Amino acid sequence: EELKKKERESQKCRSILQEKLNRLALLIGKIGVAAGVSVFLILLIRFCVRNYTGSESRGFEAKDLLSGLKFLIIGFTVLVVAVPEGLPLAVNLALAYSVSKMLKDKNLVRQLYSCETMGNATTICSDKTGTLTTNRMTVLQIFVMGTNSTNLSINWNFPPLLLECLCMNICFNKSPSSTLQKPKHVEGPSIQMGNRTDCALLGFLDVLKVNFNDFINKYPKESIIKVFPFNSNKKLMTALLDIGEGKYRVIVKGAPDVLLEKCTREFVDASGNIGEISALSLKKIQTVISEMASN
């Protein structure tokens, strides 16, 4: 019973190619047995017809046993030659060659039979970002102070306080590993490292002609009092900064629907005037959010 159990487990571990090779080897073995027996019988019958029938027939002699043994050896030789002993080796060599070819395409395969498994795949489901796309994100649309635009190249005349708060939010409310590195080629795009959403916002600062590294260096580490990382339940992240003269600033980044519930004031014009947020403004912002989400 234990042996049957182990045999069933070993059969479950076999791959499709191994199952096919086993069936092929079994078939070739059966053909080899039939061919070996046929060769032995044909040689034996031909010997008997030549020596025991016709005008030159003779009786049985002891040396005829050696001839029969010779025929038997020939039959066994046919059987041994028919057994495909080199078939598993040839398959492994073919798989190893496939692995080396895939490695040149920067595809590391640790198990040889993974090639066979992927070869039998009929449907492949993969994520989009980084697989079908370049794994880069950029800011395509902005809504600020009632202006909704997809043309980011225009001269944005932000009030100084708004620009400072925006830069603070982008530079300090982000993953520590998120940054932009210089491209390998002078005209190439910057290399995004870390969270791609954070990198897209850092790239937006370039549009505003703000160097995010210089802006971060303006505030020493001692000025960053506390950083609350993104929480999936609260849907936001928060940073508390000491801006000097005994003043502190709390900057928050998160889901628009959550932040709108906490907002009470807004920038009303390019001069930097701040007023109470109206129901009309809230409705307009919610409409823009819905349009951005649908696009």
Image (cartoon, rainbow, N blue to C red):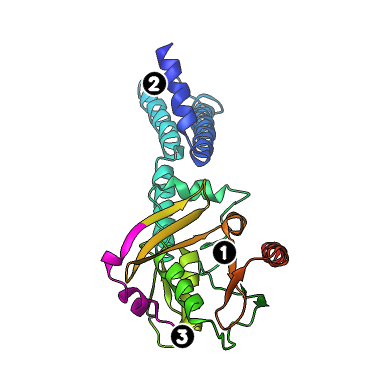
Q: Which mark identifies residue 211?
A: none
Q: Which residue is mark 2?
A: 61
Q: Which mark identifies residue 209?
A: 3
Q: In the rendered image of this protein, does residue 67 appear above or below residue 237?
A: above
Front-most of residues 150 and 9: 150
**Callout 2–callout 1 Cβ contact below 8 Å:** no
Percent coordinates x, y for residue 265 in the rendering: 58, 66
Point out the tag, 2 or 3, that comes first from the N-terminus.
2
Front-most of residues 136 and 272: 272
**Callout 2–callout 3 Cβ contact below 8 Å:** no
Q: Which range of residues does the magenta coloring cover?
A: 209-226
Foreground label between 2 and 1: 1
Name which residue lies at 50% across and 71% down.
Answer: 200
Q: Which residue is mark 1?
A: 132
Q: Residues within 10 Å of mark 1 (few under 14, many from 20)?
A: few
Point out the tag, 1 or 3, that comes first from the N-terminus.
1
Q: Amino acid at mark 1?
A: Leu
User: Quadrant of the image for the C terminus?
Assistant: bottom right
Q: In the rendered image of this protein, does residue 61 appear above or below residue 175?
A: above
Name which residue lies at 69% across and 62% down.
Answer: 286
Q: Residues within 10 Å of mark 2 (few under 14, many from 20)?
A: few
Percent coordinates x, y for residue 222 in the rendering: 26, 65
Task: Report, in whole angstroms, how far the alpha carbon at label 2 lies from the one at label 1.
Answer: 81 Å
Assign a secondary structure to mark 3.
loop
Foreground label between 1 and 3: 3
Q: In the rendered image of this protein, does residue 1 appear above or below residue 19?
A: above
Find out whether residue 31 is within the magenta segment: no
Q: Amino acid at mark 2?
A: Glu
Name which residue lies at 41% across and 35% down.
Answer: 80
Q: Amino acid at mark 3?
A: Lys
